Amino acid sequence: MNKKVLALLSSVVLTAGMLVGCGSKGMKDGSYKSEFDTFDDHGWKGQVEITVADGKITDAKFDYVNESGDLKSKDAEYQEKMTKVSGIGPVEFSTQYAEALVEKQDPATVDAITGATTSGDDFKLLADAAIQHANDGKTETAVVKAKK
């Protein structure tokens, strides 16, 4: 019980701190993109793009791209293999993470999707970077160091 209360309290404090920090500056309208600095061991690089209007995220896209410029969510073979192993593929989790960000406006409050938790961690890092650029009004792509 104490762990649940502590976790809830910590979450409230962190969320309030983020809202105060974001609210004082506010996101500037426009499109903002972030991507990892390198491709992963499977040849994919995560990327997020958000659109901000009236200081709110109105659209978000999340996907991975390979060196040829192909999107993971458009790779039918990858979709089939991942779905067989984890019950979900990039077509679904890419859309679900992006929609959750538009709904919640805060990557920290986006729930992990079973079978795509590593992608969820990637998404949160990239979304945070895009939001930071939106707060600063920086329109160049934010480059995020990929975790190894």
Image: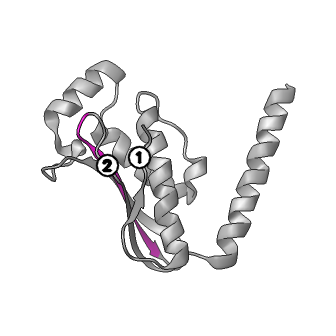
User: Which quadrant would residue 34 be assigned to in this image?
Assistant: bottom left
Place of residue 62 in the rendered image (x, y in percent of width and height, measured from the top left): 35, 52
Query: Could you say which disc has been placed on residue 146 in the image?
Result: 1
- Name the residue at 46% across, 73% down: 52
Callout 2 amino acid: Thr
Q: Please say whether residue 30 is visible from this viewpoint.
A: yes
Place of residue 8 in the rendered image (x, y in percent of width and height, measured from the top left): 78, 40
Q: Please say whether residue 55 is visible from this viewpoint.
A: no
Q: Nearer the viewer, residue 14 or 111?
A: 14
Task: Decide whether residue 19 is among the magenta residues.
Answer: no
Task: Decide whether residue 48 is among the magenta residues.
Answer: yes
Left/right of residue 30 with respect to residue 56 in the rendered view: left
- Give the Cα distance between marks 1 and 2: 6 Å
Place of residue 119 in the rendered image (x, y in percent of width and height, measured from the top left): 41, 39
Place of residue 115 in the rendered image (x, y in percent of width and height, measured from the top left): 41, 27
Left/right of residue 138 with respect to residue 107 in the rendered view: left
Q: Is 63 located above or below residue 58 in the figure?
A: above
The answer to whether the residues at label 1 and label 2 have Cβ atoms under 8 Å apart is yes
SS state under label 1: loop
Callout 1 amino acid: Ala
The N terminus appears in which quarter of the rendering?
top right
SS state under label 2: loop
Q: Residues within 10 Å of mark 2 (few under 14, many from 20)?
A: some
Labels 1 and 2: the sequence-earlier one: 2
- Name the residue at 49% across, 79% down: 137
Q: Nearer the viewer, residue 133 or 3?
A: 133
Q: Is 90 located above or below residue 3 in the figure?
A: below
The residue at which mark 2 appears reads as 38
Q: Which residues are magenta?
A: 42-52
Left/right of residue 135 with respect to residue 78 in the rendered view: right
